[in-house]
Amino acid sequence: MIPLKLGDKIYQTDGIRIYESTISEITFTAQKMICVTENIAFDETAIGKNIFLDKKEAQAKLKGGEG
């Protein structure tokens, strides 16, 4: 499980820009963890694809790197 907590910043990319958000809610189901920010809701499967825990990783993804 990804170590996220309320107040953590995440970085979302849409392939063009990076958006910074703050986790305001975390819900656990039997299958996954769902995080909610002021902009989006996501589960841990999005981390590393279009959600990043570090801005440098998000920047690397935009530049075509693996992060």
Image (cartoon, grey):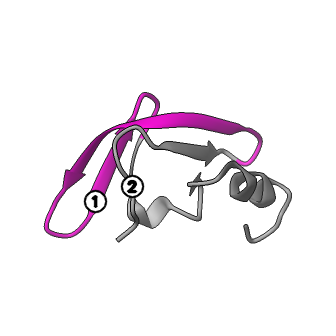
The Cα atoms of the two marked residues, 2 and 1, are separated by 10 Å
Q: Please give the label number shown on residue 4.
A: 2
Q: Which range of residues does the magenta coloring cover?
A: 15-40
In this view of the protein, which residue sits in the foreground, 52 or 6?
6
Residue 41 place in picture, x, y as percent = 38, 43
In the rendered image, which residue does mark 1 sit on?
33
Q: Quadrant of residue 52?
A: bottom right
Q: Quadrant of residue 43?
A: bottom left
> Which numbered mark, 2 or 1, is in the foreground of this view?
2
Kindly identify the amino acid type of the residue bearing the numbered disc 2: Leu
Q: Furthest-top residue in view?
A: 38
Image point 46% across, 35% down: which residue? 22
Kindly identify the amino acid type of the residue bearing the numbered disc 1: Met
For disc 2, the neighbor class at 10 Å (few under 14, some 14 to 19, many from 20) is some
For disc 1, the neighbor class at 10 Å (few under 14, some 14 to 19, many from 20) is some
> Is mark 2 in CB contact (under 8 Å) with mark 1?
yes
Image point 60% across, 35% down: which residue? 20
Vertical relation: 67 (above or below) 19: below
